[in-house]
Amino acid sequence: MIVRSATPGDAGAIADIYAPYVLQTPITFEIDPPDAAEMRDRIADTMERFPWLVAEEDERVLGYAYATSFRTRAAYRWIVETTVYVAQDQARRGIGRRLYAPLLDRLAEQGFCSAIGVIALPNDASVAIHEAMGFTYRGTYEQVGYKLDRWHDVGLWQRDFGVRPDQPREPLPPA
């Protein structure tokens, strides 16, 4: 298995991995799964500032991880929100960790100060991977998402990349 930077050509495989999470779980609060064209646009819209990675084996994309803005206001620009999804038939193979480790390394190298994991609860698997990757629980928004006929909480986990500089430099584009 290799981990590499995603390309727009991976959009269909990424959309296929994501669709069951959208349709069958409250893990994401999206209701309608994006198609390949929408996913390609999402990748293109964020790749200039944030990395997208895929795990690939035998020419099949098994999972993906990426970062995006935590919030849109300028003062938040050193903080990112991170996400990882693995094809459901590939769970428990360590793919999520193999994606998350280089994603977090790249974000730190770019000059971001923290990554935030936003987790729809309950989700023991997501909590476990975030905590294994050094994220710390920071709080819960209660009953903020309604999906699959019930309200869901959202927990926030944070991983800092070191001491915050007094005068942070602008984050670099992905390498």
Image (cartoon, helix red, strand yellow):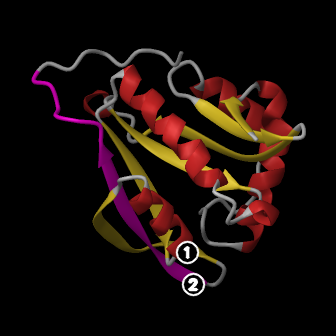
- Judged left or right of residue 57, residue 18 is left
Assign the N terminus to one quadrant of the image.
top right
Q: Which mark is residue 146?
A: 1
Q: Is residue 36 visible?
A: no
**Residue 145 part of the magenta segment:** no
| Disc number placed over residue 165 in the picture, else none | none
Q: Position of residue 52 (x, y in %)?
A: 62, 32
Q: Is residue 120 left or right of residue 16?
A: left
Identify the residue position indicated by label 2 in the image. 150
Seen from the viewer's position, the closer of residues 160 and 155 is 160
In the displayed structure, would residue 64 be above or below residue 169? below
Residue type at tag 2: Arg
**Residue 34, horizontal then vertical, whole percent:** 77, 48
Lateral position of residue 150 relative to residue 7, left or right: left
Give the camera-side residue of 17 and 175.
175
Q: Residue at x 81, y 65 (%)?
A: 89
Q: Give yes or no for contact between labels 2 and 1 (Cβ–Cβ under 8 Å).
A: yes
